[in-house]
Image (spheres, grey):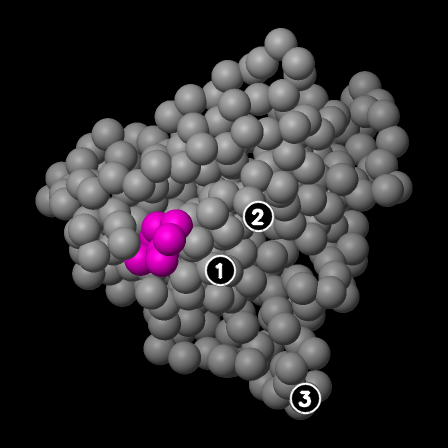
Amino acid sequence: MTEDTRPQTPGTSRCGFVALIGAPNAGKSTLVNQAVGAKVSIVTHKVQTTRAIIRGVVLKDDTQIVFVDTPGIFAPKRRLDRAMVDTAWSGARDADLVCVLVDSKKGIDAETDDILHRVAGLAHPKILLLNKIDTVARETLLELTAKANAIAAFSETFMISALNGNGVDDLLAHLATVLPAGPWLYPEDQISDLPMRNLAAEVTREKLYLRLHDELPYRSTVETTQWKDLKDGSVRIEQTIFVERDSQKKIVIGKNGQAIKAVSSTARGEIAEMIDRPVHLFLFVKVRTSWADDPERYREMGLDFPTG
């Protein structure tokens, strides 16, 4: 939540959904976290980290801005890939406004070019966000702006660094003036619509990726199976890490259990800080060879199960 917010004034409030669309690792989750001022979406080096739609809520003056962090758009090869890409475009279609993030360092490659052409067909108001501007020359940014606007009609272009916050407040100030008039949809102190048990599972998945890097298979997931409030004010959380093969289970556990202990320790600390309560975190690893084809797993992740 930004510092310059004030209570909602009847008759002057605005509220709307802003979909963030872009290729994997364009910086969508980083931007949401920067705008909200807290972590609501996990960020790793691994592409396609975001799987389902996550909403981050920001108050700017009398406007409630609901950022819709969508999975990165890429060429889908598997059922899970198709579900993620379908979810991303669904988030764009349902929003009041669409922001397209372009990694300035990568420029407009084939993947981003395809996204821009598809976005051009959307009737929504569209804003171009050139991210990671600290990595390229100004001349390059101007060239990217011209090239992107030649493909899709953007109402505005903002040059930002989602990581350090440069340009983000200007973006928020603009969004606060163009979103539809209407009452806020979320309580003033709510920063995400993701249930805490789901967010806790996402935190653990992030720590898995950061700990194991490329050793951890892309087709793995984490679910919170128990959340129990204890009498002393702490909470007991049990989570299951699903992998597809025994060899992957051994990687997650690590030699003498060192990997899973390290993941549990870092995840527990971050979850405890998020909920401001002591946390007892217990992680279990299960092999489920076909979890990526199990409709129940998709429901847990907030994705529609592709049947085709």
Q: Magenta segment, which residues?
A: 251-257
- Looking at the image, which residue is at 49% across and 80% down? 106
Query: Toward which corner of the image does residue 177 lie, by quadrant?
Result: top right
Helix, strand or loop status at disc 2? helix
Left or right: 105 as drawn, with respect to 76: right
* Residue furthest to the front: 256
Q: Which residue is mark 2?
A: 266
**Which of 142 and 137 lies nearest the eye of the viewer?**
137
Numbered badge on residue 137: 3
Q: Which residue is mark 1?
A: 210
What type of secondary structure mainly makes up the magenta span?
Answer: helix
Q: Nearer the viewer, mark 1 or mark 2?
A: 2
Decide whether residue 195 is among the magenta residues: no
- Looking at the image, which residue is at 31% across and 57% down? 251
Q: CA distance from mark 1 to mark 2?
A: 10 Å
Circle 3/circle 1 CB separation < 8 Å: no
Q: CA distance from mark 3 to mark 1?
A: 30 Å
Pointer 3 or 2: first along the chain: 3
Helix, strand or loop status at disc 3? loop
Query: Toward which corner of the image does residue 136 lie, by quadrant?
Result: bottom right
Q: What's under tag 1, amino acid-wise? A: Leu
- Looking at the image, which residue is at 61% across and 69% down? 131
